[in-house]
Image (cartoon, rainbow, N blue to C red):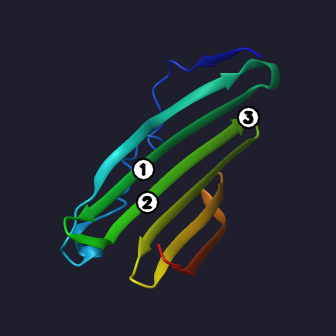
Amino acid sequence: MNIRVLDAAPTSAEKREPEPIVSVGETNGRLSGTVIGSEPYSERYLEEIGMTVGSEWQLHGTIAEGEPNSNLMSMRTRRTSRRDDWNVEWRTDVTMTSTPSHFVIEEGIEALADGVRIFAKRWNEKVERRGN
């Protein structure tokens, strides 16, 4: 399969800055977000099937010294696919925090067609800690 990175500049929708995953307000003023890793938005054209695909991701993590339950890990991704007559995008996010008794996992998915949201769902789960 032949893949090439597109030379064209991204559209205005693709140039948008990623939203911050962690902010001081979300963590009661104790923590600030630290980017652990990221990949900026890029696209590739798949000649055999005439499709352009794109992706980006960010991983954030924080912890306050001396406060092990202040840990917060968060990841956000965005994927795109388009051809002549369609254009879709899906976004995912997951955040894990902890309390003395539970791990707390929040996650979501969102799907867009031609820039219009067609599906979104969020989950929030607590998992009991068993000696960890």
Label 1, secondary structure: give it. Answer: strand
Q: Residues within 10 Å of mark 3 (few under 14, many from 20)?
A: few
Q: Between tags 3 and 1, which lies in front?
A: 1
- What numbered label is drawn on residue 59? 1
Q: Residue furthest front?
A: 131
Q: Give yes or no for contact between labels 3 and 2 (Cβ–Cβ under 8 Å).
A: no
> What residue occupies the far bottom of the structure in this picture?
101
Corner quadrant of residue 80: top right
Is mark 1 in CB contact (under 8 Å) with mark 2? yes
Distance of label 1 from label 2 (alpha carbons): 6 Å
Which residue is at a point 53% across and 79% down the rendered structure image?
Answer: 130
Three-letter code, disc 1: Leu
The reply, left or right, for residue 115 in relation to residue 66 is right
Earlier-in-chain disc, 3 versus 2: 2
Q: Residue at x 74, y 34 (%)?
A: 84
| Label at residue 83 | 3
Lower position in the chain sequence, tag 1 or tag 2: 1
Q: In terms of depth relative to the viewer, which is nearer, 91 or 94? A: 94
